Image: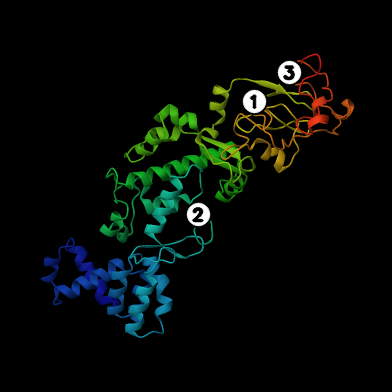
Amino acid sequence: MNHIIDDIYMNYLLCNKELQTLLSFTNKSKATIKKYIDIKENLHEDLYQLFSTKKITIDIALYLIKHVFNPEHQLYIYPSLINLKTPDKKIKIKEECICDICCGNSKLFEITPCCQNKLCLSCLRKIVLSSSKDIQFQLLSCPFCRHIFPLDYLYMIFKVGNIKLFEPWRNKYEYEYNFKIYNDKNFRCIKYYLQNTIYKYKYNLQQMIQSNQINDHSLEMIKEEITNHIYSDCYHCVQKWYGNHKRFYKKQYSPENIKMKYISLGKIEKQCVNNEVPLKRKMFLCQPCFDKHNSGEFKKCPHCGIKTLKPDGCNFVRCKCGNNWCFVCNLRLPNTHEGHNVHYYIGYGSGPYDDHCRISTNYKGETHILQECNCKHCRERNGAPLCKNIDCYRPTNFNKKYSQTKKGLFYNIYCDQCL
């Protein structure tokens, strides 16, 4: 059977793919020739070779290519068809066309390069779209094994950069339609949005590799960085090039979005936010934007007196002396969750990235500050902190109100001469 199909297809190519011309050189019917051409062009090469051993029939081959467009998916299905009868084989093929994630029927499936599981094209598109709309930068990973998708794999699927695809099934109308779905609100095609999202994803990966000095361009090494930090687009960069984030997203529907590569990434530590502190876009600033917009405010460590520039976002300061303090109230904090998060929490949405704390707002509950410290610096002052005045290095004295109310500060914030 193979040599018959090969001869028909070779003559078809010699006739410049004109079916009417081919009919004058063969005694085969038009319907038969169409079947042979369809099999030759759309069936996986390994399955096509099985015609010589009679392990696959014309009927099953046509049914397979009609319901399964991806040749790799055809090869993925075939082992489960070997010991079945023809009616059962067709039922099995239909069952394999159901996505394990969305439970929807589809002819378009991708085989994941990591764990070799099938994933429908619609689910893969939703993974990219959902990650692009989130404030937090997310790695595009396999929903089965969480392995990060390679960039060339995403480029091939979404046809980024007008790359040439030699697989005929990717040029079919059904495949193209998956990326030409229009937004309901403004009737804009998401094809360019998807491609621009992949471009931005690549720019973000490059920035993370350069900023963290990762020599091996392994996506798994970037995954380790994501576990400790939260990344997002720099707020001031977006304001500079697009005006606001709404315009930034709208511009991604355009065929060309060259300004997108100028949007840098800002990052914050994951331990600086918890479930009660929602992420805000103003939290994320790249280092150049932070240096440009920073007020240059200095305060000194209440433990050792080292002068510190205002940190980029989180007000929980880790001094070089090994101790911690609050940049808002200039008081010592314990190196625990209470000092790092609870000290700044005064209501829903508040946290260490806001410019206020429990001391600055006269919070009536527990302040979670370090009343006494036994470090080598504070031990010389009998556990008292330094005066809040940046030019004063005298210790503060006992707070008389503390013995009366049992609330507030054990020591004064300023020394007696600076009060």
356 vs 201: above or below: above
* Residue 310: mark: 1
Decide: marks 1, 2 in contact (CB < 8 A)?
A: no
Q: Hey, which residue is sitting farthest front in the picture?
A: 404
Judge whether residue 399 can be spotted in this image.
Answer: no
Q: Amino acid at mark 3?
A: Ile
List x then y, in percent, for residue 140.
48, 51
List x then y, in percent, for residue 299.
70, 22
The N terminus lies in quadrant? bottom left
Which of these two is toward me, 82 or 195? 195
Judge whether residue 81 can be spotted in this image.
Answer: yes
Of tags 1 and 2, which is closer to the observer? 1
Q: CA distance from mark 1 to mark 2?
A: 36 Å
186 vs 312: above or below: below
Q: Label 3: few (<14), some or many (≥20) within 10 Å? A: some
Residue positioned 25% across, 69% down in the render: 38
Return the residue at label 3.
Answer: 390
Return the residue at label 2.
Answer: 141
